[in-house]
Image (cartoon, coloured by chain):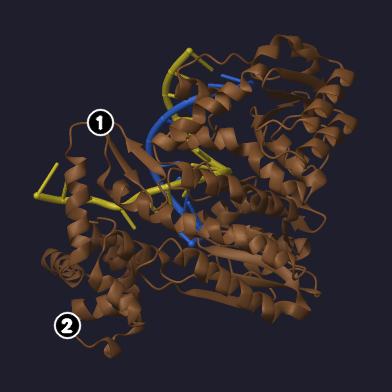
Chain colours: A brown, B blue, C yellow
DNA sequence: TAAGTGCCGGAC
DNA sequence: AAACGTCCGGCACTTA
């Protein structure tokens, strides 16, 4: 039976486990309700109230103290495999990782495995701001009632003994499910990417808070002086959404956000507190991104994939014509502009190319002619007739018949009566309930998701590669990776980032060449 | 008063 | 037959 609230028993159990390492060990971390978990980026361990361990035939729970956590850490680093359940306590996990850093980070990667499994098996994510809890996921998944209180304190540990004992059966139940649904590859990817995510959250991105405040002050000034209603709306948006960041989110000259690798249907990251993935670009708020800069001894590497969604779509749709464009090193937007205008690619103007870019992304994911028409008018000041808009769509489909075939195939799915599941290259699933299939999402999610998988693979490889140069990743924005490296090795780091990102994506997107643009920069943007 | 929803606009 | 997508979050609004 379970030993409770007894540090001696906990240590004895750890010692036994080390003497005879089990194949798997469940470890369980409980958050402390006294310290709200959403208070982020506090490296203290105060929010972990209790830790529990469970393996075949024995388990123990103990209050989390520096000593017990250190003992746990020591045991983890010597055990062959660790399954860790963290119960609504991702933040606690992150803090544990932050406290011990590498090489424990590799072990910590396993911490998230059951939640990872549960979310992957759920085949989609909950909308809204509250992510599903592990309890909800696992109960639904296993069709069992896994009783554990939502919040745990040392005082209620006796009531949760059964939960600790349930850990091994839980993983034992989940593993065959992952196999059956062919989720093992994406499961492994998601587990492996966690250390680099943790490291990135911990690092944060350097920001010049004073410069940030100056720009915010300019917004306020202009807001008082302008009469233009449209401008006022824009400024209100900027002020209400971003102006407070300098006060609320800068600590020690850095902004630290939360990154969520499993919170989206597509497999892309989401980002909160603050959402650094929506920092206004230079076009919207000049100079704002330039506030993100390290001190002079460090330099940023800003790298992104070139036209990654088009390349992934060419791959998944088996579209030879679109593949050919990339194989020949041509510009896909210029190519589309040429087919629409009927003129050679080298006579295409910048404006025509810009419109063709919208054509490519719109038509690729199922936009209709009439919406394209209004899009061209609003976004580009190009007035088209219905006929011209429809012709543009036809031209696109004729140029890329493989894309048209892919649309037809997915359209067939969406007419099916039962539920429909679409998958990424590594097997991540998105399920649509019967009658709720979105044609456009069914096109889009596998493409975004496959790109995200290549990106995550790059993150896994980049973390140690940058570390060996004295650098580190500081932010990801879907297809963009930002690293901070010592200025002396900037060019070497740039080349490394470019090569690693390219090869990582190419290992998944195999039928189309991959291009990465990596730059050495003093600032972001 | 708290919690949920829809719209809009920021990013990619 | 036709259908651009993925997110987060502020604001205005309704609901309990």
A363, above or below A197, in the image: below
Give the chain letter at badge 1: A
Q: Secondary structure at mark 2?
A: loop
Observer-nearest residue: A89 or C16? A89
The quarter of the rendered structure image containing the C terminus of chain A is bottom right
Observer-nearest residue: A202 or A242? A202
Q: Which residue is found at the position 77% from the left and 28% from the top?
A: A17
Disc sitting over residue A336 in the figure: none
The residue carrying pointer 1 sits among few (fewer than 14), some (14 to 19) or many (20 or more) residues within 10 Å by Cα, namely few
Q: Where residue A209 sits: x, y (%)? A: 76, 61
Dot 2 corresponds to which residue?
Answer: A342
Dot 1 corresponds to which residue?
Answer: A434
Name the quadrant containing residue A153.
top right
Q: CA distance from mark 1 to mark 2?
A: 43 Å
Furthest-front residue in view?
Answer: A20
Observer-nearest residue: A79 or A251? A79
Q: Secondary structure at mark 1?
A: loop
């Amino acid at each position: 039976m379970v030993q409770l609230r007894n540090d001696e028993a906990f240590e004895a159990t750890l010692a036994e486990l080390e003497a005879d390492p089990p194949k798997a060990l469940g470890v369980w971390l409980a958050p402390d309700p006294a310290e709200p978990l959403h208070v982020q980026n506090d490296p203290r361990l105060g929010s972990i109230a209790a830790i529990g361990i469970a393996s075949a035939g024995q388990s123990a729970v103990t209050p989390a103290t520096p000593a017990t956590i250190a003992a746990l850490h020591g045991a983890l680093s010597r055990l062959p495999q660790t399954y860790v359940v963290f119960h609504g306590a991702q933040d606690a996990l992150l803090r544990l990782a932050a406290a011990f850093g590498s090489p424990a980070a590799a072990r910590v990667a396993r911490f998230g495995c059951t939640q990872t499994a549960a979310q992957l098996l759920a085949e989609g994510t909950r909308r809204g701001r509250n992510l599903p809890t592990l309890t909800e996921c696992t109960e639904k998944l296993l069709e069992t009632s896994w009783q554990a209180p939502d919040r745990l304190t040392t005082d209620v540990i006796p009531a949760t003994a059964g939960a600790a004992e349930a850990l091994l059966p839980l993983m034992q139940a989940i593993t065959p499910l992952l196999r059956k649904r062919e989720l093992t590859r994406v499961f492994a990817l998601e587990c492996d990417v966690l250390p680099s995510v943790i490291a990135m959250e911990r690092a944060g991105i350097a920001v010049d808070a004073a410069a940030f405040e100056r720009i915010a002050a300019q917004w306020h000034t202009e807001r008082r002086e302008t009469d233009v209603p449209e401008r006022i709306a824009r400024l209100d948006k900027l002020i209400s959404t971003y102006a407070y960041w300098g006060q609320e989110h800068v600590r020690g000259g850095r902004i630290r956000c939360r990154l969520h690798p499993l919170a989206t249907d597509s497999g892309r990251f989401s980002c909160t507190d603050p959402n650094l993935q929506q920092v206004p670009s230079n076009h919207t708020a000049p100079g704002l991104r330039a506030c993100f800069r390290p001190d002079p001894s460090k330099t940023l590497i800003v790298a992104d994939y070139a036209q990654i969604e088009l390349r992934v779509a060419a791959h998944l749709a088996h579209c030879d014509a679109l593949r050919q464009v990339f194989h020949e090193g041509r510009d896909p937007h210029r190519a589309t502009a040429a087919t629409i205008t009927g003129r050679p690619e080298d006579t295409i103007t910048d404006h025509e190319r810009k419109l063709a870019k919208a054509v490519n992304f719109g038509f690729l994911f199922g936009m209709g002619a009439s919406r394209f028409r209004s899009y061209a008018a609003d976004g580009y000041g190009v007035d088209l007739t219905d006929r011209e808009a429809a012709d543009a769509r036809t031209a696109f489909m004729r140029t890329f018949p493989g894309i048209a075939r892919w649309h037809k195939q997915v359209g067939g799915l969406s007419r099916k009566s039962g539920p429909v599941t679409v998958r990424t290259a590594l097997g991540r699933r998105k399920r649509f309930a019967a009658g709720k299939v979105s044609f456009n999402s069914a096109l889009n999610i596998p493409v975004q998701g496959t790109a995200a998988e290549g990106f995550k693979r790059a993150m896994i490889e980049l973390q140690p590669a940058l570390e060996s140069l004295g650098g580190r990743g500081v932010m990801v924005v879907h297809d963009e990776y930002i690293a901070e490296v010592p200025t002396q090795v900037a060019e070497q780091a740039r080349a490394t980032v470019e090569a690693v990102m390219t090869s990582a994506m190419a290992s998944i997107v195999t039928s189309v060449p991959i291009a990465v643009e990596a730059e050495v920069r003093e600032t972001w943007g």
